[in-house]
Image: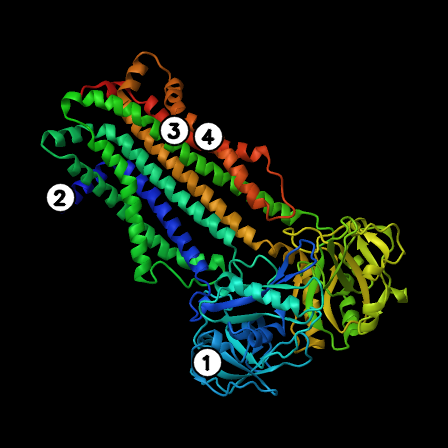
Amino acid sequence: MIWNYFKTAWRTLLKNKVSTFINVLGLTVGICACMLVTTVVLDEISYDSHWKHADNLYRIVSVHPDQADGSHKSGAAYVGLAPELQRNFPEVIDYSELYISPIQLKINKQDSEPFNSVMLYTDTSVQNLLDINLLQQGDLAPSSETSKIIISKSFKENYFPNTDPVGKILYDVPRYEAAANEYLIAGVMDDMPANTHLRADLVLIQNRSIQELNKDDWGRYVRHYLLLREGTDYRAFAEKVNTWYKNNTSRKHVTQFEFQPIQDVYLKSDFPAYQIIKGNIQHIYIFSGVAILLLLIACINYVNLSTARALSRRKETGVRKVLGASRAYIITQFLIESLLTFGIATCIAFVLYQLSISPLEAFIGHPLAVTLNAGWQYIAGGGLSILFICLLTGLYPAWLISGFKGSGTLNKLLQTTNRNHNWLRKSLVVAQFSISIVIVVAMLIVQQQVNFMKNKDVGFNADGLISINHVSFENNLDALKTEIKRDPSVISLSISSWLPSDGAGYMVKTIDNPLNPGEKQELWYIAGDPNLAETLGLQLTDGRFLSSAISSDALEATDLEAEVNATRPAIMTRGTFDALQINSLNQPFEEAKILPVGIVEDFNSESLHKTLMPTVIVAYKNPPYGALLIRVKPGTEHQVMKSVASTWREMYPEKFLDMSMVKETLESQYKAEEKLRTLFTAFSLLTMLLAALGVFGLVVHAVSLRFREIGVRKVLGASVSGIATMLSKDFIKPVFLAILIASPIAWWAMNKWLEDFAYRIEIQWWMFALAGLGAILIALITVSSQAIKAAIANPVDSLRDE
């Protein structure tokens, strides 16, 4: 019996090739998209859940007082806090400092080219928190003479194949030290899981940092993780800690602390966390929603085509009923057809899914730790989900078709059925085009926002500006400047404590807000050569720039007492001048210890996700370390970079050179939005394709049902355009309704998305018009192609007796 169901279903699918092709193609696209997005989502939410103590590991998060927004957070805390918590609270079992950082290494000191890697910096208690599986082990005890590291299995296979690496030395390419640091390989471990924000190739184990917790609420920051006792309520524990800290601190307004579960660190760190590997929970919601909508459109197509074909299958159903078939039998038969269609689509989708894993990993930028074929639970879960969707999608058409009676009341029932269910097919067409239009509008808005961020005037001239990341200059700064300036394409260069996209500045002070008495606000400092503002290309609107010809304009970089107590000349932005309500230049602003001598136009020191911060620029003499900004003639950037690299190798043969074009650095801040734009572009094309396929199937079916009517109309004198218009209007009306429904939904959703940007575009009417026009054109082209074909057919063929 079961075999007979499948054999009949297979014959039916082969007989109706067009609708079968549309259904299989649509479902394949929808299922494959859902599988890929589900893989990404499962991988993202699995981060750091694999550790043995994952449910009891927490990062200390500091909530700073008196900040501009009232609750500024950071993913670090005072170095002395964690040991004090362990001493004072029985809930704390252990703690460890944990963070990763890129490092450039050499196997041999004389190697000319280093390779990039990632180091996990931690201390001796790391194994109490993280389960690091050692495959080979030497003496791991930290040494004051040589740093000891553990390398991963993959690292060993890449750089020490068929060799025992324990006891060998690696050399780094330092930024601040004059000579390379040595790292003794003391062990080999299993690879770190790909789904951890602490993913690294090497682990450096150091002695714990020792520093007493300051009573005045200040100190050096580190990134500490706590291991709490099982069953500890971390929110209640945070309240206890904050009460204890406030009672033991002399200041009135003190830092508060939160404890963030390690499983939340990757996706829920929307604050400064000094974190390299970081996800975005909002993007997970967006991708999941769009993938579900793609599958929904495919299922709508299936329901639409199945209900439309119900009329053409009335004879088949009537014959089955006359021969004694029960309604349950007929429902089962049509559900088997649904199951077979979904099964074929799923098999094709799974093949495409397997082929897409590698490109997907390349797109997201890291390997996937979780895939749908990684375990039986994922395969079983996916199979049951598809089976449920299949039964849910196929049940209504099966119920509808099985309701047809025998010959006597068939025509009357068909007319009633057609009237009752035509509205449903039109509603589903409206739904799928509404979804398509929403996604197209989202794609247009994301596209415009990305272009806006890339092209917005940030207040300084990024063209022709080259940066060298922070290094120490080993008393060779003047010689380095002289050598770089020999290139005639170099216009100017400056040492800076700050680089574009490197945060708001190198130092921040909290001062009283003149516009809102009783409130505090941040004032950020950028320091560098006296000519830093000119090298950046800032626009002077009042007063003067700082000058190296005026000795008082710059402090000695090593004069810490002067930095704390002296009132130093400064340039400030126009917004800062107004926000601090300064009346005139060359008058000391004592609270900030500055003497404003010039005003420049506002400039964005951070990405456009964040608002302009009050900013001043001060000058130093002879800084021992910093970043370097080089202004060159536009178009000569690559030539100058080669020249600088050659000079650098001569002067600093062992020091790391991290050089880039500032314009490219600024654009790299928006990689996440670029990926979102790419995905929305792909999704919008797929949704429109699926919607067009659905309409195409309905048009083909409608033309087949009205083939004789079209022939009669032609004999009676109807024109080709008249017949095409008659067939098209029934399918174009739902698209207009879809535009009306989709527009407010898209406007609301994208307004919510744009709230994450301090500087954003205004949503324009033409975006909705363009998306709607695109949907109308696709629907018209799809409908017209079949309508015109039917209209130009020979009426003799359609009127011939059966």
Q: CA distance from mark 3 to mark 4?
A: 10 Å
First reached walking from the N terminus: tag 2 or tag 4: 2
Q: Which residue is mark 1?
A: 188
First reached walking from the N terminus: tag 2 or tag 1: 2
Q: Secondary structure at mark 1?
A: strand
Quadrant position of the N terminus in the picture: top left
For marks 3 and 4, give the one nearer the viewer: 4
First reached walking from the N terminus: tag 4 or tag 1: 1
Q: CA distance from mark 3 to mark 2?
A: 37 Å
Q: Which residue is mark 3?
A: 783
Where 101 falls versus 431 (above or below)? below
Packing grade of label 4 (10 A; few <14, some 14-19, many >=20) is many
Image coordinates for residue 167, horizontal then vertical, percent = 51, 87
Given contact means CB atoms under 8 Å apart, are the residues at marks 3 and 2 in contact?
no
What's the amino acid at mark 2?
A: Asn
Quarter-of-image position of residue 702: top left
Image coordinates for residue 122, horizontal then vertical, percent = 55, 76
Mark carried by residue 4: 2
Q: CA distance from mark 2 to mark 4?
A: 44 Å
First reached walking from the N terminus: tag 3 or tag 1: 1
Quarter-of-image position of residue 562: bottom right
Q: Secondary structure at mark 4?
A: helix
12 and 371: which is toward the camera: 371
Given contact means CB atoms under 8 Å apart, are the residues at marks 3 and 1 in contact?
no
Packing grade of label 2 (10 A; few <14, some 14-19, many >=20) is few
Q: Which residue is mark 4?
A: 776
What's the amino acid at mark 1?
A: Val
Write the residue at 29% across / 56% down. 380
Image coordinates for residue 614, horizontal then vertical, percent = 75, 54
First reached walking from the N terminus: tag 3 or tag 4: 4
For marks 2 and 4, give the one nearer the viewer: 2
Write the residue at 34% across / 37% down. 301
